[in-house]
Image (cartoon, rainbow, N blue to C red):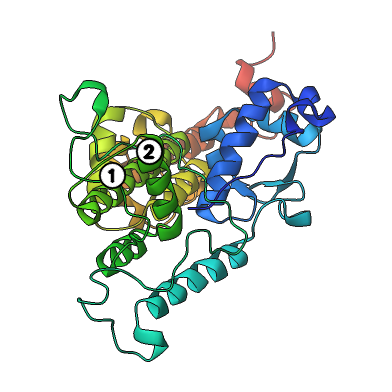
């Protein structure tokens, strides 16, 4: 997990006051999204429209909090002075922690795993607070997986509080890595929660497994909702949002969310897009895997009616042209070459 950092003087900064609360709401949401997606402060147009409005984005540009770039916007001085970590820094830090945890679970780095008798499901050598300067703050709005249903005040009546020497095991590490979650953030939040809520449990490894499971569900739900909203904002014919959401979930089994979003945006931006009533419903488009379609043909090569009956239209035009030419050849031939020929189409001189 990557944090989007805001300075404590931000609320009354001149630019913030000039931008106004609605635009700053977009700024904060977009910043959190960029930190999560590691885009280094770049916000695609479709995502800006999902998180806020065009007028809010323009206001951020006006006060110099955002800059316009091809395909979207970019935060002003995203990483200057260490304001926000860059993608490379985050990836490097994650690699560091992954290697650190792997080595800690081996006997002195020799490659031999510690014995169960010495350290069952514990990674030796770790100390709380070892980090690269990252703050271990509790994750906001996390579910409470250790609370027992029906207990007064949510207090757990199990055996013991979280031991000081407890550490995540290899299974926890694997699950967090597979989900793309930062194990150290999860552990720190778990410890804070257990301490602040005075939680007790018989099996803290199982409790932490449940914590990771809830975190994965939280992340997946948040990502899926944001990505579908981005697709919906991009798609040019908004009909049947509920069924489209179901089709979206099925489509994600065949491709990734960014492919669907970009294809929907490309369709919306296509200059050859037909009338709205001829654009397929988003559910139909998703179920038919239309994101794989070629670009639409140019309007000059398509039928006037978007139903596509080109041959019928061409034949009708040819018949009409032939009739017009025949009528021109046979019209009032006796006037041809006379001074009154110019008035032939009016029926002759008065």
Q: Is residue 136 left or right of residue 295?
A: right
- The residue depicted at 26 percent of the width and 58 percent of the height is 254
Label 2 sits on a secondary structure element that is loop
The x, y position of residue 76, in whole percent, is 76, 46
How many marks can you see?
2
User: Is disc 1 placed on a helix, strand or loop?
Assistant: helix
Q: Give me the disc on residue 13.
A: none
Residue assigned mark 1: 214
Nearest to the observer: residue 47 or residue 300: 47
Give the quadrant of residue 249. top left
Distance from Cα at disc 2 to Cα at disc 1: 8 Å
Q: Is residue 146 visible?
A: yes
Work out which residue is located at the far top of the displayed protein and give it.
Answer: 350
Residue at horizontal 28%, vertical 44%? 214
| Residue drawn at 61 percent across, 66 percent down | 89
Q: Quadrant of residue 346?
A: top right
Image height of 238 relative to 183, above or below: above
Residue 175 position (above or below residue 220): below
- Viewer-proximal residue, 28 or 314? 28
Whether residue 271 is visible to the viewer of this picture, yes or no, is no
CB under 8 Å between discs 2 and 1: yes
Residue denoted by label 2: 142
Q: Determine crowd level at label 1: few under 14, some 14-19, many 20+ residues with C-alpha closer than 10 A.
A: some
């Amino acid at each position: 997990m990557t944090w989007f950092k805001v300075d404590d003087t931000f609320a009354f900064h001149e630019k913030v006051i000039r931008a106004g609360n609605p635009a700053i709401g977009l700024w904060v949401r977009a910043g959190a999204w960029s930190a999560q997606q590691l885009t280094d402060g770049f916000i695609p147009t479709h995502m800006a429209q999902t998180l806020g409005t065009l007028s809010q984005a323009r206001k951020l540009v006006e006060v110099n909090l955002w800059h316009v770039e091809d395909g979207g916007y970019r935060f002003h001085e995203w990483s200057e002075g260490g304001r926000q970590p860059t993608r490379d820094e985050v990836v490097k830090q994650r690699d560091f922690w992954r290697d650190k945890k792997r080595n800690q679970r081996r006997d002195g780095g020799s490659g031999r795993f510690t014995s169960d008798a010495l350290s069952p499901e514990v990674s030796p050598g770790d100390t709380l607070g070892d980090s690269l300067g990252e703050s271990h703050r509790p994750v906001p709005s996390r579910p409470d997986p250790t609370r027992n249903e029906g207990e007064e005040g949510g207090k757990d009546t199990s055996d013991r509080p979280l031991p000081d020497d407890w550490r995540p095991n290899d299974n926890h590490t694997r699950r967090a890595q597979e989900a793309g979650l930062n194990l150290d953030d999860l552990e720190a939040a778990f410890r804070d929660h257990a301490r602040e809520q005075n939680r007790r449990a018989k099996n803290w490894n199982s409790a932490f497994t449940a914590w990771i499971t809830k975190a994965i569900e939280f992340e997946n739900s948040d990502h899926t909702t944001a990505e579908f909203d981005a697709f919906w904002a991009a798609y040019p014919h908004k009909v049947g949002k509920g069924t489209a959401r179901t089709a979206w979930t099925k489509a994600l089994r065949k491709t990734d969310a960014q492919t669907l979003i970009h294809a929907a945006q490309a369709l919306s931006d296509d200059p050859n897009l037909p009338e709205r009533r001829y654009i397929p419903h988003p559910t139909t488009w998703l179920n038919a895997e239309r994101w794989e379609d070629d670009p639409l043909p140019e309007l000059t090569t398509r039928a006037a009616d978007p139903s596509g009956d080109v041959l019928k239209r061409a034949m009708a035009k040819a018949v009409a042209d032939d009739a017009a030419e025949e009528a021109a050849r046979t019209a009032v031939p006796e006037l041809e070459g006379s001074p009154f020929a110019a008035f032939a189409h009016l029926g002759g001189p008065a």
